Amino acid sequence: MRIRRTSFTAAVVLALAACGPASPEPETPTPPAPTVSTTDTTAAKAAGAKDAQPLPAPENAQSAPAEFDPVAEGMTAAGVKKLCDDHLARAQELVTAIKALKGAPADKLTYESTLGRFDDVILEVASAGEFPYLMGVAHPEAAVREAAKSCEPKTDAFTTAMWLDQDLAEVLRAYAKKGDKLEGERARLLSDVLRDFRRNGLELDAKKQQQLRQMNAAITKGGQEFMSNIGASTESIEIDPKSLEGLQKEYIEGHPAKDGKVRITTDYPDYFPFITHAKDRKAALALYVKFTNRGGKQNVKLLEDLLALRSQKAKLLGYETWADYAIEPRMAKTRKNVREFLDKLQAALKEPAKKELEELRAAHVAAGGKKTDVLYPPDRYYLEEKVKKAKYNFDSQALSEYFEIGAVKKGLLDITARMYGLEYKEVPAKAWHPDVTAYEVWSKGQKIGKFYLDLYSRQDKYKHAAMFGVRTAKRLSNGTWQHPIAALECNFPKPGAQAALMSHDDVVTFFHEFGHVLHHMLTQSELASYSGTSTVRDFVEAPSQMFEEWAWSREVLDLFARHHKTGAKIPDDLFSAMTRSRAFGRALATQRQVFLATIDQELHSRKTPLDSTKVVAEVQGKTDVFPYVKDTHFQSSFGHLIGYDAGYYGYQWALSLSRDVLTRFRKDGLLNTTTAQAWRTEVLAKGGGADERGTVARFLGREPSHDAYFSYLAGKE
């Protein structure tokens, strides 16, 4: 998943939490990464973004700086601090230049000198914060991580001050009153900026503005601590070697006993296979409790403090709840609309989920359990495997034999290069860890971007799978194009003595996250504000959710999925079993997503202070067929609550759009290059600069519909 933290102006494409859909991770969406910020971009009245054109240099301002390489500059403690400080200083120079126009005659208030320059500020704050945020969660050295984390409070303080700057607002409002005819993303930017001065407290008195500054600083600090606690939390259980029964040979060989015990950690490559395949369900439940409680009770306290701060901030700005504040600029618009959407989903899932649960219980009894036994959340994955194997003859471990990670990576790159007319050139990474690889992206003989792949789990690394922005694309004020840079952070198996075999869930996750990379790479927005994945939060996952479908296609899988020993393609019977069993478990998995979205809404809608553990237990009792597990506090490890606060519903909202988009790809062919180019031009290239619903409508040739989504939920696809 991809998320922009801090604020709209920062344009920081910062990922937060897993986006991998099919993965059994409790907070992961069932088909997915955002997004967007304190202020998401709204659905503008403008019809769409213009093609990017060179802009004249701004009047009375320094020339735009040369393109910079944040990776080369920011991989040391001193370097990452300097990178942050230098770009914030540049941002301040630009703000000062705009403010100097206060009281200037109308002919001096040009787009370039006001709103265009304001977008340059957005770029500089993004440049200050993007790579330091990544280094704060991915660099192997603690000193660098700590130095990097010092940047986010600075960028947040800067953007808070900027939105509260009366002189800056006066100049931009004066330009708006001038009435220049703006089109496309420029018109959208003016509308959003004027709205966001209000949303960020400009109309408050001086005393309340100071309170807002203090709240924003405390929210930033609390969010950093919350995520750091999750990242540093690697819990484990010790089990007898016999408790590995049911696991793959490679997994067992990778977990040798020491002093008669085997250690299983809560890191993804350990956790997911164990809870899905281990026959020792007591051990699986014990590991689930450890996994769910990552972040510890300190994160429960931090979260409840954050909820109180967010509630206070919302009220200070004139909103009843944080949910009302956060949802206003998104596609959903209101908390009421989100509630109705979730209620509709819950109702549609009630009977299908009940039927799936009955099949899981039958599988439990067939395996020797009792009808009266309690089934716990991790049992869903284990019993789904049983049902799929018995009913559909599907063996997920056998399927993983065809997904060696190197072959999957090559296949993914080959397929996207073919679809979008791209070329990937591997280049020396010179990155933050030896495991990291780097690729330049070329199109029609021109370099258009670069991305880094950091695919394997390690200590103190970001625990989920997500795309992080490293550099934002923009048409610079001197007319040159700054191409984008991204990093993909994952926790897949690492090649070693045993073959690094991915589950099919991992493969789907890889395709999903690379969908975010493509969105970031293929942007042609002239503005940093709307570059790449800088769309409204409840749309941003749609392109990557859509791309998951490629990992289910026989045509696509035959291009790279080979048995790691024999080189054979996936057998017809195994592929058929995979696709026939696909729909089973979908209702329960989606119900889980509704549960998570409802937790998010409840925590951000209720009066504070509150007991967040009690809220989790209550919501689980109302929305999930699996019971709350005593002595757990899931919210302590729910990373989406930082950055996706009151926005988790967006995964399902975007999924509806993605299933609709797939109707054209299915009709034309998933590898149809004409259709792929239309998707690139009409949607991916626009970023957030055009109304998201409108871009989808243009691609489809009609208004979007929920029909495909509800057909999908009913298991008809």
Image (cartoon, rainbow, N blue to C red):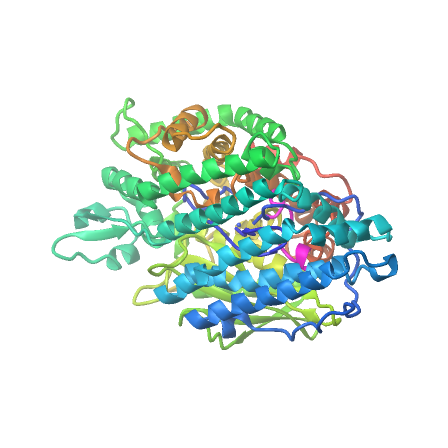
Which residue is at the front of the view, 208 or 185? 208
Q: Residue furthest toward the left?
A: 259
Prevailing secondary structure class for the magenta stretch in the rendered image? loop
Q: Residue furthest toward the bottom?
A: 428
Which residue is at the front of the view, 589 or 133? 133
Camera sees residue 561:
no
Q: Is 707 left or right of 635, judged from the image as shown?
A: right
Q: Is 693 left or right of 254, judged from the image as shown?
A: right
Q: Residues in magenta?
A: 526-540
- The C terminus appears in which quarter of the rendering? top right
Q: Is residue 239 above or below residue 377?
A: below
Quadrant of residue 158 within the rendered picture = bottom right
How many numbered tags mark residues here?
0
Expressed as whole percent of the image width and height from the top left, the position of residue 246 reads 27, 46
Q: Is residue 74 above or below residue 20?
A: below
Expressed as whole percent of the image width and height from the top left, the position of residue 64 reads 69, 72
Q: Is 429 left or right of 519, judged from the image as shown?
A: left
Camera sees residue 468:
yes
Q: Residue at x 44, y 58 (%)?
A: 490
Q: Is 604 left or right of 163, judged from the image as shown?
A: left
Q: Is residue 307 above or below residue 556?
A: above
Quadrant of residue 706 within the rendered picture = top right
Expressed as whole percent of the image width and height from the top left, the position of residue 18 reads 46, 49
Q: Residue at x 53, y 40 (%)?
A: 648
Quadrant of residue 378 within the rendered picture = top left
Q: Is residue 529 part of the magenta span, yes or no? A: yes
Which residue is at the front of the view, 449 or 111? 111
Expressed as whole percent of the image width and height from the top left, the position of residue 319 reads 60, 32
Q: Is residue 568 part of the magenta span, yes or no? A: no
